[in-house]
Every structure is written in C-alpha cells, then in structure tokens.
Amino acid sequence: MNDEIEVECPSCSPDIPVLHEVLKSGQNILVKCKECEEIHSPRIEKEKPVYIKTVISKGEKTFTHTSLMYKGELVEVDDEIVVDDGVSEEVYPIIVTSIESQGKRVDSAEVDYIDSVWGRAIDEVDVKIALHSDQKTYSITKRVSGGYEFVVGEKYNFDDISFVITRIKIRNNGFRIKDGDVVEAKYIKRLFAQEIFREKHRGRTAWSIKRKG
C-alpha cells in the first residue's frame, strides 16, 4: 500500500488540501488525487526547524539542552516529547512541565513563540516509596525505567525488601487505590506500600536487621 498525504489538487481542489496517493517519493514527488485521479507534482513546503532551549530535570540533576522543533508545532504542558538537537547523540524523552512564551509561563504555545521549555526526563525515573513497617513508616527510592509498571495490590522486591503496594499517588495529585490499578513509573509521585517480613528472621528481613543495626 502506497503512502498518502494531503495536498491541494490543481484540478478539483486548488485551495483546500485533499487526500492523495503517493506514486513516487523523493525530491520530485508525484501524487494522484483520490477525488478526481489527477496526477501531478505538488509543491511541498518543508517545515523550518528551530532550536528551543530546554531545561531537563533528571533525578536530583538539572541541565540545559537544545531541542530541535518545527515552526507551527504546538507544545503543551504534560506532552511527552523527545529532546534531540539533531547534532549530538544525546536524546532525552521528557514530559513537559512548564513553557515560557514571550516572557510568560503558559500551558501551551506554538514553537514560533516559545522561549524555553522545562521537562522531566522519563527514560529513567526515581520512584519514592513510603514503606509501612512495625508501626513506622520510612522511605526508599528506586530508579526504574519510565515505562515500568506498578500495580496496586501486587508484590515487589527491591534490594531484598519485599512489599505490597497499597496505593499510588500520581503527579496530578490523584490516587490509585483499587487492586489491579496500573500506573507507569513516569507518572508516579509516590508509592505507598506495606513491607512483607520473613519468618526466618522473626518478623524482620535481613535488610531490616542491618538497617536497625
């Protein structure tokens, strides 16, 4: 099946783009109108790339990069984009957390009017886990891939610590509390869990004994 694009047809639709079948791709593209079957070579304007200052947070670190974007493209807070300057080998998938346009913070803007973008890296993320144990609660942090799934009611084992997730706080301040609820790590603000103890250590894991020292 050939590719399809929307362009103006000189025969039946000179002002409004309509669907065309691509007969020949490349520099001298040849297309066939799906409405009237006119075959022609359309003039396709290439999008102009621009470099946007992008501030990326990854764990405890923050650094500045440049992102190759295209004029007319709309960027919104919570969008998932790939930061790639088109030159270096450094590529970062991020979630947009803030946009500065013409000196103001906005929720969305076209690339033409964007001064800077802030984002949170999601290739790897640090997940904070609040563990309830022996009437006390303590915290640990685990780095996982952004797409790693956590499920309410499921058992996990990190660094010899076994626990069951009781609820998940997501970044829009909502919670997931039902058994079977699934949330990817990149959207999680904090996990709440109940630690599982091992009987052979009389109610304490080996890690707990070492920790309480």
Image (cartoon, rainbow, N blue to C red):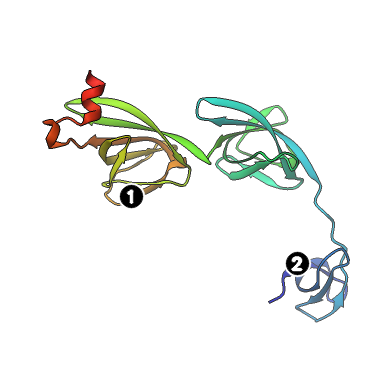
Residue drawn at point x = 73 percent, y = 42 percent: 68
Q: Can you tell which mark lies on residue 181? A: 1
Image quarter hosting the C terminus: top left
Question: Tag 2's secondary structure?
Answer: strand
Report, in whole angstroms, how far the alpha carbon at label 2 lies from the one at label 1. 41 Å
Residue drawn at point x = 68 percent, y = 46 percent: 74
Residue 122, position as x, y percentages in the image = 52, 40
Residue 139, position as x, y percentages in the image = 32, 26
Q: Can you tell which mark lies on residue 6? A: 2
Is residue 81 visible in this depiction of the protein?
yes
Image quarter hosting the N terminus: bottom right
Residue 28, position as x, y percentages in the image = 88, 67
Q: Tell us which disc is closer to us: 2 or 1.
A: 1
Closer to the N terminus: mark 2 or mark 1? Answer: 2
- In the rendered image, which quarter is residue 100 located in? top right
Crowd band around label 2 with a 10 angstrom C-alpha radius: few (<14), some (14–19), many (20+): some
